[in-house]
Image: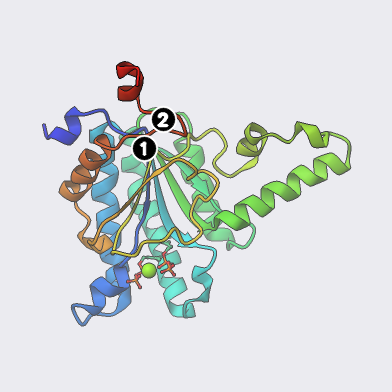
Amino acid sequence: MSKAENCRAPEHVAIIMDGNGRWANARGLPRAVGHRKGVEAVREIVRAAADAGVAYLTLFAFSSENWRRPEAEVNDLFGLLKMFIRRDLAELHRENVRIRIIGDRVNLQGDILSLLLEAEETTRNNTALTLVIAFNYGARDEMARAMSAIAADVEQGRLKASDVTSALIDGRLDTAGIPDPDLIIRTSGEERLSNFLLWQAAYSELMFVPEYWPDFSREVFFAALERYASRDRRFGGISDKAVALGS
Ligand code: IPE
Ligand code: IPE
Ligand code: MG
């Protein structure tokens, strides 16, 4: 058992899987090959997260801004998600993994939508790792949808303005019921959130690693968990060590 499996794992790890295109470019291959290779990394990291004792793993698979890419690439990415669910759902279910999808569902085609619903429905009572797939997800879009639903409730008298608290907003986001991410990892060396979990990331530890997503292995993941274990999270207070010293 590695050190990462020994130490207390973060409850929720969220990953911005970036760098598939550059991974392919560096090898003179088409970007689509990088995306396909990226799915293999997904398979490896889902198992690694479960082995490490992570309870929630969120993977950013397609952002609400990724529609700006060429149509052929958008089709590749949609095709890969469909293939992943078709091929892996039965095995993930056997492994007791629960699947949740976050993101806007309104603009999704019927076939992908029904696959996503099937994945959620099939695995809804599973109790091992919860795999949250952020697909057609953007934090601003998520917050705008939540605010619009809250405004409709106020308009129709189901809620008062004073009912709108941080906890109520939590419950209206796509991530309702999912704890905030303890650790957000972004691969490929880019250091930005790109509209990922902006509300939920208020106190997340951020980690930027140089590896392109297809090269993000179990070992690199465990090394990130070890680095996380040495972070001092204060949530605006003072560290436990300072409390113990009475300083
Ligand atoms: C991540 O890799 C996959 C998605 C964003 C869907 P990219 O496709 O962004 O790869 P780079 O950043 O261009 O290398
Ligand atoms: C973020 O990566 C979205 C996903 C990983 C799905 P991008 O590659 O789209 O982000 P930017 O455009 O570099 O900020
Ligand atoms: Mg990118």
Residue 98 sits in which quadrant?
top left
Q: Residue at x 31, y 17 (%)?
A: 244
Q: Nearer the viewer, residue 198 or 98?
A: 198
**Does residue 141 appear left or right of residue 136 in this picture?**
right
Kindly tell me whether mark 2's CB lies below 8 Å from ligand 2.
no
Looking at the image, how many numbered discs can be counted on the residues?
2
Circle 2: element type = loop
Q: Position of residue 40 (x, y in %)?
A: 25, 57
Quarter of image, ligand 2: bottom left
Q: Residue at x 29, y 64 (%)?
A: 189
Q: Residues within 10 Å of mark 1 (few under 14, many from 20)?
A: some
Q: Residue at x 56, y 54 (%)?
A: 139
Q: Position of residue 23 (x, y in %)?
A: 24, 71
* Residue 238, disc: none
Circle 1: element type = helix
Going by the numbered disc 1, the residue's amino acid type is His
Mark 2 sits on what residue?
126
Q: Nearer the viewer, residue 15 or 127?
A: 15
Residue 213 sits in which quadrant?
bottom left
The reply to whether residue 70 is in sight is yes
In this rendering, is residue 110 above or below 74? Answer: above
Given contact means CB atoms under 8 Å apart, are the residues at marks 1 and 2 in contact? Answer: yes
Going by the numbered disc 2, the residue's amino acid type is Asn
Mark 1 sits on what residue?
93
Q: Residue at x 31, y 42 (%)?
A: 91
Q: Earlier in the sequence, mark 1 or mark 2?
A: 1
Q: Position of residue 95 (x, y in %)?
A: 30, 35
Q: Residues within 10 Å of mark 2 (few under 14, many from 20)?
A: some
Q: Quadrant of the N terminus?
A: top left
Instruction: Spot the residue most to the left.
Output: 1
**Does residue 165 appear left or right of residue 87 in this picture?**
right
